Amino acid sequence: METREILEQLKNGEITIETAEKFFKKEPYRELGFAKLDSHREIRSGFPEVVFSSGKTDEHFADIVMKLYEHDGEVLATRASQHQFELVKDKLPGVVYDPVSRIVKVEKPGKSQVGKIAVCTAGTADIPVAEEAAQTAEYFGSAVDRLYDVGVSGLHRLLSNIDTIQSANCVITVAGMEGALASVIGGLVDKPVIAVPTSVGYGANLNGLAALLTMINSCANGISVVNIDNGYGAGYIATQINRLCVKKG
Amino acid sequence: METREILEQLKNGEITIETAEKFFKKEPYRELGFAKLDSHREIRSGFPEVVFSSGKTDEHFADIVMKLYEHDGEVLATRASQHQFELVKDKLPGVVYDPVSRIVKVEKPGKSQVGKIAVCTAGTADIPVAEEAAQTAEYFGSAVDRLYDVGVSGLHRLLSNIDTIQSANCVITVAGMEGALASVIGGLVDKPVIAVPTSVGYGANLNGLAALLTMINSCANGISVVNIDNGYGAGYIATQINRLCVKKG
Amino acid sequence: METREILEQLKNGEITIETAEKFFKKEPYRELGFAKLDSHREIRSGFPEVVFSSGKTDEHFADIVMKLYEHDGEVLATRASQHQFELVKDKLPGVVYDPVSRIVKVEKPGKSQVGKIAVCTAGTADIPVAEEAAQTAEYFGSAVDRLYDVGVSGLHRLLSNIDTIQSANCVITVAGMEGALASVIGGLVDKPVIAVPTSVGYGANLNGLAALLTMINSCANGISVVNIDNGYGAGYIATQINRLCVKKG
Amino acid sequence: METREILEQLKNGEITIETAEKFFKKEPYRELGFAKLDSHREIRSGFPEVVFSSGKTDEHFADIVMKLYEHDGEVLATRASQHQFELVKDKLPGVVYDPVSRIVKVEKPGKSQVGKIAVCTAGTADIPVAEEAAQTAEYFGSAVDRLYDVGVSGLHRLLSNIDTIQSANCVITVAGMEGALASVIGGLVDKPVIAVPTSVGYGANLNGLAALLTMINSCANGISVVNIDNGYGAGYIATQINRLCVKKG
Amino acid sequence: METREILEQLKNGEITIETAEKFFKKEPYRELGFAKLDSHREIRSGFPEVVFSSGKTDEHFADIVMKLYEHDGEVLATRASQHQFELVKDKLPGVVYDPVSRIVKVEKPGKSQVGKIAVCTAGTADIPVAEEAAQTAEYFGSAVDRLYDVGVSGLHRLLSNIDTIQSANCVITVAGMEGALASVIGGLVDKPVIAVPTSVGYGANLNGLAALLTMINSCANGISVVNIDNGYGAGYIATQINRLCVKKG
Amino acid sequence: METREILEQLKNGEITIETAEKFFKKEPYRELGFAKLDSHREIRSGFPEVVFSSGKTDEHFADIVMKLYEHDGEVLATRASQHQFELVKDKLPGVVYDPVSRIVKVEKPGKSQVGKIAVCTAGTADIPVAEEAAQTAEYFGSAVDRLYDVGVSGLHRLLSNIDTIQSANCVITVAGMEGALASVIGGLVDKPVIAVPTSVGYGANLNGLAALLTMINSCANGISVVNIDNGYGAGYIATQINRLCVKKG
Amino acid sequence: METREILEQLKNGEITIETAEKFFKKEPYRELGFAKLDSHREIRSGFPEVVFSSGKTDEHFADIVMKLYEHDGEVLATRASQHQFELVKDKLPGVVYDPVSRIVKVEKPGKSQVGKIAVCTAGTADIPVAEEAAQTAEYFGSAVDRLYDVGVSGLHRLLSNIDTIQSANCVITVAGMEGALASVIGGLVDKPVIAVPTSVGYGANLNGLAALLTMINSCANGISVVNIDNGYGAGYIATQINRLCVKKG
Amino acid sequence: METREILEQLKNGEITIETAEKFFKKEPYRELGFAKLDSHREIRSGFPEVVFSSGKTDEHFADIVMKLYEHDGEVLATRASQHQFELVKDKLPGVVYDPVSRIVKVEKPGKSQVGKIAVCTAGTADIPVAEEAAQTAEYFGSAVDRLYDVGVSGLHRLLSNIDTIQSANCVITVAGMEGALASVIGGLVDKPVIAVPTSVGYGANLNGLAALLTMINSCANGISVVNIDNGYGAGYIATQINRLCVKKG
């Protein structure tokens, strides 16, 4: 612990007050250790760093994935292409690629998943975003129930699964087109709903903005919204919520 | 019948070919009689002219309302203020004003209302637009069932009324905020749904644009959309649809 | 009938009140039978399920098309590519592909088309969307009249076909660019007009939003609007309307 | 003539080269005379300066109106309120105020109006903007034909007046809501059409943007567009066009 | 319990199977009791119904507030005016009005507030929305820490309060203008952040849309967003999250 | 004359009143002869039909171009690709392709160009749109002066060419990015300015919408606007204006 | 200096390492003294705190203004109403109110203004925003040249003042409507131009967004943009720039 | 001096008043010598012309780059592709290409860079835009400090570099997604901040518009904004600002 070392050296007369003072004046943030604190927080909270693969050069992608793997013993990369997977396939034991969620992943053996997050989609075209959310949450240690294709145009599909949805600590609702599913679920559960608009649709869907507006304006309580197609973000915050229950248990 | 009179006068030698020709050359549209045809169509279709009151000067409002009353024996004025009602209150026997729908109206006694249109709202704040729709449809001769405050955040309210909704020839769905009601109803009925977005809401509702986009992008089939707050337009087209059934009955 | 069985078992003392109560608490949605109702509704309404091909993987596309064909004896897939057609070409007897409407289709022999829907386009570039609407309506059993390239910049083309348009039970108006055709037709017919904005145009057409706004704001009565390029949706709701006439006949 | 005077004084030895040089170096724009040139251009082109009244303080309004009247012997003020009219009513002989167009005006006696501009509106609510256009054009010396309430929802009203419209040198088309009138007129005439979107309408008319987009995307040739509610601008450019004919006559 | 009564009556032979069957067929939703379930859920979850006062007529407002008070022994009304407060002031013992949050409230004595929610604002102008959130959360039983005016333009204000923020179970971040506070807080805490954009600002803030977009696009993890100025919604979902901790404790 | 024949036959007893009446009821539009009128108008106005090539299939393109050539002895196709040119290169004597304006053209020998249109661009990237405008105007018989790359960031380039611009009957101003050129030219000439926004630029240019808004909101008089990148439309209306001068000459 | 004291106490054995460590872990932000630093920065940079008056309650406004006056011996309040001025008029010696810029101000006697900022407006309606910018800059110690009503529709007004503009260290350009002035000035000077779009205009000006887009897309170099109507912000950053020159002088 | 020669010739009777007058009327712009002034300004200000490569044809690109090199002895081309670099690689001694910033460049040997500009980015994906800014500034003679990946989600990265940032004459802040970095830096420095929104992000980032709105609405003082991804523009104006310090030194 750097701070302590300085203080001990000062106490022991190994350094002068001026030297110590200089250290604290010049390096407060490092010493306060945002970077360190960050490491601490990551360890404590169980959110290791994750790779957003899209747009990365080949070298950068492979480099970052390998470094994180070496540091954490596991690694998660979202929005990865098949090509990017090929770059690390032979270097990482046990690495897998899911073309639906576009996730490249190595997981430590024996991880347990606790609590419960329900991930619902309106249609089958929303599944890639939902899988990004679900697999992110699972990677971060949450148990996940998937309920796909339960959109409001066939309400019975949703209603016949409502028990499962109501038993989760947090519900992720993934929907494109008009995004009405979030409001309907919001009216049926008493847990927080994280709504993920998707860019699924055409015409006046404005690449997902229509669904985003629907969800932001929802008449139901207990709904908050993340960015269009942001499955990762939904999986992250849902895990934060899910952990609140678990930790207290 | 002007056309016929001209032709008869020509045949009877009362006018020359030149006179007749001049009439048809100069007045084709009148003679072909868009105006007449229009009158005919109105009589036949039962859609008398209606007054859009908003923005009209006091004189114009009173003048038009009186003229239509004299011509048709009844009159409907939408988006009228209490003040506008006062302008004609003492001149029109039996005139009434509904401050909710903002409709000024005199109706012929003994009109019958046939068929069935269901008018649903998501919340109570949508009722003014719904009443404009319902009363317009009734004025045009449609029977109307009202189902208000059946929004998706409390799905049971909608589901317990679903029989009534399913029995209509056409369903008008009026909703603001996120407008999800249209999709849910669209999935539950097999008749055309006319969706009316309302400006009810705040923030990112964009004065009704959010609800309009929801409805236009609906994942359910059988939904088409009119302008924001356009209860009159919904009542009009729903009556057109409702009549299709009735006439054939 | 499950409900009755439970009740009978209760009355006969085969089960306890608690068991019966649990059933009704837990299974309301199944008992109310939305799924069954749904099946019933499809059979009754004659709207078999349809495939939205765009974005589907090869396996999913072929799988769904084959399953629906096996179930219904016919199948309609919209927004299909030539490639997707190739996937099922040899497996489905009598399957055809129309590159204009992008529809893959097998139809039962001897289907009749009744009533009348008029499908109009402003220009020739709107024809793909119009054909999706027309062929959808025909697949669902509606007779269709096509009137293409009757845009308002050459009004005579429209006016010389007005009789055909006026004789339909419902008019589908397909237009891009500024979409003015809907308003003009709306003023000339007394039947419902379903307006379909298309993404045809350039510059400030905003990929069809300009036409959508034109149609939503139409000064003519009796017009309602579906999503940009949504020929299928227009064909669907127009068929719902068309059937209202036919059933009563 | 300032330029000439300086040159004459130089030639006559009344001033030195240095004095003349200083004048041309220091005042090139004034001397080259944008201000003068401007005056010249105004005199030549017949476009005297006009007052945009809206937002002006009482003093500024009265002051500018009086100064222009004194300079030109006539004055036109657009977007003026009744209150602003009261400010100059007693100071300007023959001043008149039109509450519809919101124009305050004193005109020189005996002005002639030449050529022909047709000003059309879709509805009666568009008349204030149309009158601003028409009276501006008349003030600038153009003869104007008014054809109001010829919107496309009742096409016969337009068609029965088409001769008048076709005989103009330029057609100003004023329309709110969906603004389709511009396209229809554009298809019927072979002269330039100046389209003026108005803020008339509600809901998704976006305060006139919907009509503006309609007109900008028109499928008809020969249409160009000015700002929403900009009657003055339309009257101005239409007069420029109208004069092209007249001057050559 | 209605369901049970029916079953008992059936078992006791007081009613026939047909009568019981009719009950379950006709009233499934009522019997299954969405309304009842709803009541149950409200009691269980501790979210009594709340009044959204804006736009309500005087009678409706007073009526609903009184009815809820009679039912629940307490009542919360958001977005209430001073005038609305006057309507119930003399009828409700202990009712108070806070002009900042615009909340009218009667609370049961002795309610306890548990857990911890931090409510932060960027500026002082965001406080009304923040108070709506804070007082809503408190009414629903959450303990709240307020940290106002800690916007990013003076980062020290935020950083010196970071311990308080980090110790909460959920952080509500209220910010207008550019809304950057959410991202900064999101980077400093490991609990869910509910971001509330406000309409505070001017010019290109687009009445809060700019802040909403900022928050939706946040580079920090663990942020989700509610509607512009929706303090109530933030207080509601934050309480849902806060309770997850508390219940397990 | 059909009308007269009918009337004569009626008078002569060759047909009944009913037959004559039917004729006038059924054929107004044909009789009014819009189609014929149209042909007449094209011949009279000198605007032969033009091909918009973009999006046309190979067959359609070649077919239409050949038919128009056969009918008119010349043909103009805008937005044509090199590939489309190849389709007709060997079939049309004298056909040329300009890759900048993307125009395929055969012109009758010996056409004269009269009057004067100035075509200005802000930058070199606007030249393709400007050439579409210029060559369209020339094809329709207007003489054109080109003044390219005279954008406002180097005002001297514009000012040193101002005489040429001021001497035109109509000025076409083509500009992307912020589109300020239209306002500056509008302030310097007394002839109509047709402003063409282009999609040139990046970022917040919104594909030309920014330039369109600039031009629509211009503080200068005498400016009207066509669609983004619509060089053809500008060339068309400028020719209409230019002809007004010439015809009177 | 707190840091030093802690270190000395540690070295002197007055406190333990743990106590010192706790201090540095817990108080880094306070110790780093952002608050202090801030005060220092204000004194050093000469930017005392300023009051944004709009939306403040009477008490808050008067309170803040008085406190700042007492602290700084002078005070500047922007966006103040006449009413707000009345609140402090009698309490502040020498306080003045300018209804154009809406600034309430007390200034220390004998302040000098150095360097040079030119503030230009396109029209007279932009002057309130320009005065807010100019008076803000003057209050912060910058000398200001005003050049109002030099919009591009009368270019000579701008060009005849170009020397003054070119001699400034920074040019603030204030313009509404289409905002073209920024580009023209940007092309004529070699100093930074701060562009301020204003909400002046109507129709498609979108309350200033059109001008903002114009300025952001400017084809001229050396232009950057602040928020719509943000005169204060422009005056602030222009002063920052102006000081760079002055300090080095 | 041309002006003087004319005046002398006039005085000497070598030319007539009419000739002189014509000169001043016709040649004002040439006389004012904007072109000359421009050349002078470039030399004086040290901003040689730069090539915007995107969209240029191969010939044009190579031609312009070579001409500028011949004239200036150095050349900078932004937004160049690898392919465009290949076109000039062998013709220009010492030419280099940076695929990150997409800059093709030849620089004169021995150029010195003075003053200090800090270029910060929120993430690594913003680096291409930042490098365009940094290298542009360096090419124009500014010394640049780069601080990349200091986004607000990990505030310590920014704070530990704050000294470097505070010591610059001007800070360029490059950020996509929500763009919050500009506000945070604006609150920490007392020098002008030039904010560059980037198109980095997805979903509701609207291709950079979200970040642009964030920056325009910043709550911090001293921030102004350039176009999305406009690194060049930021480097240019930052150099203008940086030079103000240096010249005075």
Image (cartoon, coloured by chain):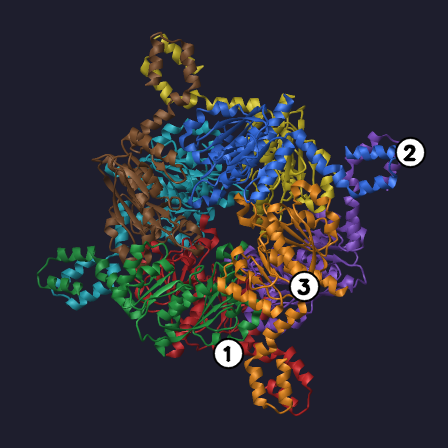
Chain colours: A cyan, B blue, C yellow, D orange, E brown, F purple, G green, H red
Tell me the element at label 3.
Answer: loop
Tell me the element at label 2.
Answer: loop
Chain assignment, label 3: D
Q: Which residue does the numbered mark 2 point to in the structure image? A: F12
Let me know if residue D96 appears in the view: yes
Q: Which of the labelled discs sits on residue H43, or is there none?
A: 1
Chain assignment, label 2: F
Tell me the crowding category of disc 2: few under 14, some 14 to 19, or many 20 or more residues within 10 angstroms, Cα based.
few
Please tell me in which quadrant of the rendered image residue H122 appears: bottom left
Say if mark 2 contacts mark 1, CB within 8 Å: no
The kind of residue on which mark 3 rests is Pro
Chain assignment, label 1: H
Q: Position of residue C184 (x, y in %)?
A: 66, 41
Residue H25 position (above or below residue F117): below
Q: Which of the image's four quarters has the N terminus of chain D?
A: bottom right
Tell me the crowding category of disc 3: few under 14, some 14 to 19, or many 20 or more residues within 10 angstroms, Cα based.
few
Q: Residue furthest left?
A: G13
Residue H24 position (above or below residue F188): below
Please tell me in which quadrant of the rendered image residue D153 appears: top right
* Nearer the camera: disc 2 or disc 3: 3
* Nearer the camera: disc 3 or disc 1: 3
The CA distance from mark 2 to mark 1 is 93 Å
The CA distance from mark 2 to mark 3 is 59 Å
